[in-house]
Amino acid sequence: MLRQRSIIPGFSLTMGFSLTYLGLLVLIPLSMVFLKSSQLSGAEICRILFSPRALAAYQLSFGASLIAAGVNSVFGFLVAWVLVRYSFPLKSLVDALVDLPIALPTAVAGISLTTLYSPNGWIGSTLAQWGIQGSYSRLGVVIALTFIGLPFVVRTIQPVLKDADPEVEEAALCLGASRWQTFLKVLLPSLVPATLTGFALAFARALGEYGSVVFISGNMPMTTEIVPLLIMTKLEEYDYPSATALAAFMLCVSFLLLFVINSLQWWSQRHRKKLS
Amino acid sequence: MGIQIRNVSKSFGHFHALKDVTLTIPYGELVALLGPSGGGKTTLLRIIAGLDTPDSGSVILHGQDVSAKNPKDRDVGFVFQHYALFQHLTVFENIAFGLTVRPRRSRPSKEQIREKVTALIRLVQLENFIDRYPCQLSGGQRQRVALARALAVEPKILLLDEPFGALDAKVRKELRRWLRRLHEEVHVTTIFVTHDQEEAMEVANQLVIINEGRLEQAGTPEEIYHQPANPFVFHFIGDVNSFNWPGLEEKETVKSSGASAGPHLRRISVRPHLLKLSLDPPEGNRLAGRILHIIPAGPYVKVELKTEWGDSIQASISQERYKHLDLKTGMEVFIIPEELQDFEGSDAG
Amino acid sequence: MNDPRAVGPELKRHETAPIRWLLIASAIAFLSLFLFIPLLVVFINAFRDGLALFLAAAADPQTAAAIRLTLLVVALVLPLNVLFGLCAAWSITKFDFRGKNLLTTLIDLPLTVSPVISGSIFVLLFGAQGALGPWLASHQIRIVFAVPGIVLATLFVTFPYVARELIPLMQALGNDNEETAISLGAGSWQIFWRVTLPNIKWALLYGIILSTARAIGEFGAVSVVSGHIRGKTITVPLHVEILYNEYNFVAAFSVASLLVLVSLLTLFLKRLAEWKRQQVFLENAEHGSQGGGN
C-alpha cells in the first residue's frame, strides 16, 4: 500500500510512529463510539436520536450555529475588508485580537459573555430595556457561538482579499463600472469560495462548542440545551447508550462537514490559483 | 487634437516617476511609449487613464481638460499587462461587462449588446471561445479578450500597458502585426507601453522615448533612429559601439590637446553596421583591431573585435564582404567608421 | 517591473472617506460587542473589589493545585505533540505514498470533533462500563476521572496543531536542502538538526504555542473525563467553572484573568513567530531566486 521513492531517510520510523500514535489516540477511541452504537438495536437508536429532547437540542444546535455562522460571514467579511483595505489607529492590535476566540479558554469566554449579556450586565441591561433577554436564552447561545466562530471567517477571507489583483478592479473602473458595481460584480464573486469556507469552518466549530455555551445558555432541557450538553448530561447520568448514539450521530455530522470543508478549501485554492 | 499632456509630474514618496512631461499625440495615431523598465512609462499611461493622479500638470483629451475626471468619464480603454480579466465571467461576459454596467437609460438592449460583442469577438478571432473562462485560454487569447473588452465601450483612446510583455516570442510577433491591422481597422488613438525597441519600431508610427521620468524624444521611428536627440536615445535605440578613435577634427583640437600625450584620442559612437572592415590600411586616421570571434549565422556576419586601444566592439558586415575578406579569428584588420555620431559637450556612454 | 504601486498607494480604488469610516466604525463596533468588551469584563470583574481580593483568589491553595495540575498536563502533552508533529510532517512531506490525503485529514479530525465527544470517547473506552473498564478495574488502574484521562483528552484535542503548522511550510520548502545534505554525506540526525530544524523552527514554535494554549485552556473534553474531584482532577478552566457556579465571581474572574493573560501572551508570541517565519521564508525565497538566476 505504501510506496517510497526518496533517498531521504526515516520513512518507516516516522510513518510507523505517526500511524501507531494516530491509531491508539484517535482511531481506536473513535471507533469505540461506533462499536458501542452498533450494539444497540435499530429501534433503540431511533428512540434515542428522535426523542423530543434530542430533536429540540438538534434544532437549537444547528439553528444557532447556522445563525452565528451567518452573522460571522457578514461581519467577518466586513472585518477582513476593513483590516486589508484601510488603515486606522491601532489596526495591528485589532488584527491580532481577532484570534482571541481561538486562544482564549472557552470557559473564560463563557463567564465573560454571560456576565456582559445578563440582565444586569452592561449590554444585557440595555437589551433588557427593549425586552430582549441576552444570557440564559437561545439568543445567548447565538452570541457565544458568534464569538467562537469569528476568527475562522476573518482568517479565511483576509488572505484572499490581500491577494486580489488591484488591476482587476481598475479594469472594471475603466470600463465605466461604479465602485458599488465593481464590488458586486467583480470583487464579491471572487470572494465567494473563501466566504463559504469560512462559513463552514465557523459552523463546524459552533456545532461542537461546549465551554462557552454552558454558561450563557442556562441549560434548560427542550429550550436552551445544545447537543454537546445533552451528551454530557447523558454521560453524567450513566446513560451510556444514549450518549454513544448521540455522539455517533454528531461524529457523522463532523465527518460530513470535514468533507465539505476540504472540498470548499480545494475549490477556493483552485479559484485563487486561477486569479494569480 | 488628440492627447495633450502638459507639465505632468508625479512622485511616489521620494521616487520621482515623472518629471515635467509635456507631450502632444495627434488624433488616430498608433504611438509607442518606449524606455527602460522603471522609467515612468506605465505611470504616464495610468495618468492618462485617470488611474493615477499627477502631482502637477494637466491631461487634455480631445480638447477637454480631464485632469479632475474619474477613469470612467474619460472615454479611455485600458489593457493591463496581465490582462486583469474577470475570472468568474466567460469571454462573452467579460467583453460585455462595460456595456452591462451602464446606467439603465444609456444601456443598450440585450440584443444590441449581443450583436456588438459578437462583432468584437469576430474582430479578435475568438469565435470558438465565446463561453470559455479566462483560465481556459492561452496568453495570446486572453490578451485579445482584454483588447475586445476595452474596445466594447468604444473608447476614444486605447491604452495598452506592455501588451505583449507576458507572451512568448512567437505569439508576440503574431500579435504585433495583428495590433497594427486592428489599428488600421478601428482607427482609435492608441498608446502602448513597451521596453522592446524592436516591437516599438515595428508596430508604432510614432515613438515617445521616456527615461528616468523624463521625455527624451518624440518622433517617427525613422527620426528617432537617424536623428537621435541625445546620447541616451542614440544608445537606447539600436546597437552602438563606443570606442577611442585616434582622429581629430578641427574644433576638437583645442579641447582635448592638452589632455593626452601621444596620439589624440576621442571617444566616438558608431552603429555596428556602419563600421567597415578592411585588410588594407585606409587613408588618414587609422585604427587597427584583432578579431576575437565571428558569428557567421544570420543575414549579417557579426564580428567581435578588440581595438589597439583596448575597446571591445562589434561590427556587422554582409555575408559577401565576409567571404571576400576571408576573415578568421585572430586576424588583424582596420576599422573604418562610415558615420560618426557626436553629441556636443557630452560623453556618450 | 514598472510598477508604481510598489512605491505608493493609488487613490481611485478606495471608497470615499465617509464610507470608509462608516465601515471601519461598524467593524469596530461589532468587534467591541463580541471581543473587546468581553475581554475588558474579565479584568474589571477581577479587580472589582480591589487588588487584595484578586491576589487572595490567585494565591488560594485550590487555585495553586489547579495551576500545578494544568502545568503537569502541559509538561506531559507537549513533548508528545512535538514528537508526533515532527514525525507526521516528515513522513507526509518528504515521501510519496498512497493515502497521504487520508492521513492529513485524519490529523485534522480532532479539530472538527466536539470537545465533549473527544472526552466521551475515553470514557467509553476506559470508563467503568467501557470496553476496557472491567480489565482496568481488576488491575486497580484508574484512567477516567483521574489525571491520565485528563492527559489523554488533552492530547487528543491538541496533537494536530504542531503537524498542521509544519506540513504546509515543509511542503513549500521542498526536499532540495535535505537531498543536498545527503549528497554531501550528512547522516540522518545531522540532516534533521542542521538542515531541516533551522528552516522550520519558527513554525514549530508557532505550533507549540498554539497547542500549549489549547492544552491550558481546554474545557469541554477535560470536563467530561475529570470527574471534578477537588484538589485532584481540577484544571484551571475547571476551577474557574466551579468558582463561578459557586457565585464566587471575583475569584472566578481573577483566575480567568490569569488565563486571559496567557492567551494574550499566546497571541503576541504567535505574531512574533509569524513575523519571524515570514522573514525566514523571504530569505529562502531570495536565496532561491539567486540560485535560479545563476
Image: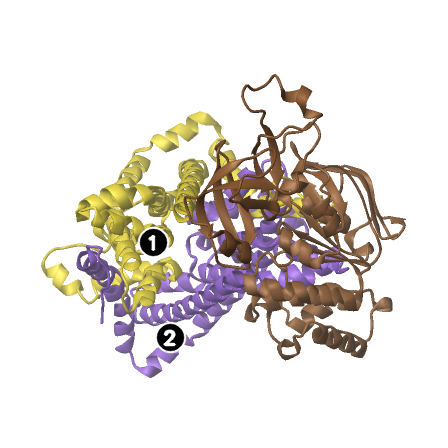
Chain colours: A purple, B brown, C yellow
Label at residue A226: none
Q: Is residue A10 left or right of residue C20?
A: left
Q: CA distance from mark 1 to mark 2?
A: 50 Å
* SS under mark 1: loop
Q: Is residue A161 left or right of residue A24?
A: right
Where does residue C118 sit, x and y in percent of width and height?
Answer: 32, 60
Task: Specify the farthest residue to the left.
Answer: C139
Relative to B344, say whether C201 is above or below. Answer: below
Q: Is residue C58 left or right of residue C226?
A: right
- Identify the residue shown where x is 62% and y is 67%: B174
**Mark 1 crowd level (few <14, some 14–19, many ≥20, 10 Å Cα):** few
Disc 1 designates what residue?
A: C174
Q: Quadrant of residue B271?
A: top right
Q: Amino acid at mark 2?
A: Ile
Q: Are tags 1 and 2 found on a single chain?
A: no
Label at residue A48: 2
Label 1 vs label 2, nearer the camera? 1
- Chain name for mark 1: C
* Residue B39 visible in rendering: no
Q: Quadrant of residue C268?
A: top left
Task: Specify the farthest residue to the top.
Answer: B258
* SS under mark 2: helix
Q: Amino acid at mark 1?
A: Gly
- Identify the residue shown where x is 48% and y is 45%: B304
Where does residue B312 sit, x and y in percent of width and height?
Answer: 49, 38
Residue A215 vs residue A166, the one in the foreground: A166
Residue C24 vs residue C193, the one in the foreground: C193
* Residue B207 visible in rendering: yes
